[in-house]
Amino acid sequence: MSSLFYLNKYLVKYKWRLIFGSIFILISNIFAVQQPEIVRDAINKINQQLINRDPSLIEGIVWIALSFAGFYMLLSVLKGLFLFFTRQTIIIMSRFIEYDLKNEIYNHYQRLTFNFYKKNSTGDLMNRISEDVSKVRMYLGPGIMYTFNLITLFGLVLYKMISKNPELTLYVLIPLPIMSILIYFVSRVLNRKNERVQFQQSFLSTFVQESFSGIRIIKSHVKEKDVESRFAQEAEKYKANSMSLAKTNAFFMPTILLLIGISTILTIYIGGTQAKNGVIDPGEIAEFVIYVNMLTWPFASVGWVTSIVQGASASQTRINEFLNEVPDINLNEGVDATLKFDSKITFKDVSLTYDNSGVTALQNVNFTLHKGEIIGVIGRTGSGKSSLAYLFMRMLDPTSGTIMIDDQNLAEVNLDSWRNLLGYVPQEHFLFSDSIKNNIIFGAKSDQITEEQLIQVAINSGIHDSIMNFPDQYQTLLGERGINLSGGQKQRLSIARALIKKPDILIFDDCLSAVDNETEEFILQAIRNDLKEKTAIIISHRISSLKYADKIMVLDEGQVVEVGDHTTLMALDGLYAETYHRQEVTQDNTPDQ
Ligand SMILES: Nc1ncnc2c1ncn2[C@@H]1O[C@H](COP(=O)(O)OP(=O)(O)OP(=O)(O)O)[C@@H](O)[C@H]1O
Ligand SMILES: [Mg+2]
């Protein structure tokens, strides 16, 4: 329960809606409890007319009935009107809070780091912002509304009943608590079954989604039949769960109706006996029957609301857990944001061990990147090249050692301003389902990118010609419902996205691997010309990508094993020279590269 206290700040924020909503519920119920008295008076009046054998009998009865009915309807309209106001205030309040909470969660998502996203699955993250927030909203809207409704209505009805006939009150109320308890237990069973259905449903949709994304693999491995039968199995489970839920549901309503029936029979029986003894008049029996029926639904809602609150509390616990997650990279938001890079970046004894895999990706790495210098990094797969880029971007902090920007520790500078200096092309690129133009200018620092700037960047990245060949050119849509780019086109688009920012430092993580040698040469030249004073780290498997590097570092199993320019490294006759000879041979044999 206490997890829900977190939401109190929002209840305070929307306190006026809550207060007015509560007042409206009270007013609506005050109108409602007048209605049984009208029925009672009508019955008693008509009864008297019949006993008195009044000559104007028929006409009198009609008028009495009509006037009471009119009054009754007026009260119904007023009651309904205030119920409408209640929903307009409390339910709308819950929608506002839902909106705020989703924004709060989403903003928090944006602040969290690499490690967090590695630890949590996308499905789980999606659920917190959709399912869990929906459950919490059920507590804030219907939960609060029905609880307050029960309290006010029960108070008012009880007052009316006791002030008229305490004995009858006692008897007719007996079944109601039993009903609440029963509903509470049934709701729990229902909730559990419902969750099972939901779980299976999300499993099914993930399964279907994956089989669509992987349709080419499925077909090429001729696995259609296997996938079909797996789907049928899971769908069967879903059906079984749904049927079980439907059965419990079917049992639920008749039970409630039975209990209401028992209450009504008790009222009529005990009321009838009292009427026979002259203790009460017949109208009062009818009045009590209506009271009992009025209380039924609010009581029935106790069980339901309890399970809503339980569900919301579990959801809010999950949400809180996540909101309390502190980004493991200190963003240094308070630090001066006017970071400048004047002379050099130094890695001092930097090591990195990944928590989850225990892999030591980098070990005692030392190097200095001077302003205007290009460093090439080469090494086998898994040697720690991408890890080096993550550290540089400060996606991760080193396990030990320090990275210095001029004379400031990277861990202490304002992170946004540091990343603003960098143009990073990751090894695994990602394109949004948007136009080519928007995908490129996503990287820009300002919205004011001219058409010329866009085209210039595309030309430098060697992608302009390909774009002009698409029917919609820069407006061509990418992604699921758009067109697919080839691997090399995607890489070049990613490069354009990094270049449009005009960064001070470029980091290329193996982003020329899917382009041919000629295009690679063109891009490297263009970058060199366009970005005269450019500082860069170019990571690659291919020696050809490093030909403009002032200095090349060779990584092996997380350690820098060789450093120097091409000639020095060749003279060392180590790993670099070996790689060079191997690649030279491969290239000679593949003339179309
Ligand atoms: N997020 C991660 N969590 C755990 N271990 C990781 C993670 N990323 C990389 N590793 C491990 O760290 C080591 C270095 O990986 P890294 O990605 O830096 O290699 P790389 O040199 O970029 O390889 P490639 O040339 O294939 O891109 C590998 O053993 C890898 O399994
Ligand atoms: Mg890599």
Image (spheres, grey):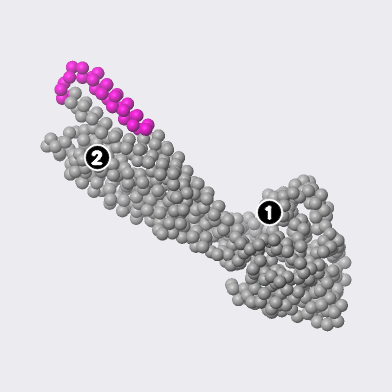
Circle 2 SS class: helix
Quarter holding the C terminus is: bottom right
Report the span colored magenta: 50-78
Mark number, residue 432: 1
Tell me where residue 442 sits by quadrant.
Answer: bottom right
Reading the chain from its start, which is encountered first: label 1 or label 2?
2
Circle 1 SS class: loop
Q: Is residue 6 above or below residue 272?
A: below
Quarter holding the N terminus is: bottom left
- Please tell me whether mark 1 or mark 2 is closer to you in this view: 2
Percent position (x, y) of residue 468?
A: 81, 49
Amino acid type, label 1: Phe
Mark number, residue 160: 2
Residue, x 24% and y 46% (percent of image)? 173
Q: Residues within 10 Å of mark 1 (few under 14, many from 20)?
A: some
Q: Is residue 264 visible?
A: no
58 and 103: which is toward the camera: 103
Give the overall secondary structure of the magenta segment. Answer: helix
Mark number, residue 212: none
Residue, x 12% and y 35% (percent of image)? 278
Q: For this view, does 315 lie left or right of residue 475?
A: left
Check if residue 65 falls in the magenta segment.
Answer: yes
Residue, x 28% and y 51% (percent of image)? 178
Q: For this view, does 404 lie left or right of residue 463?
A: left
Q: Is residue 413 above or below residue 474?
A: below
Q: Is residue 309 above or below residue 570?
A: above
Percent position (x, y) of residue 343?
A: 77, 69
Amino acid type, label 2: Lys
409 and 588: which is toward the camera: 409
Residue, x 53% and y 49% (percent of image)? 99
Check if residue 566 falls in the magenta segment.
Answer: no
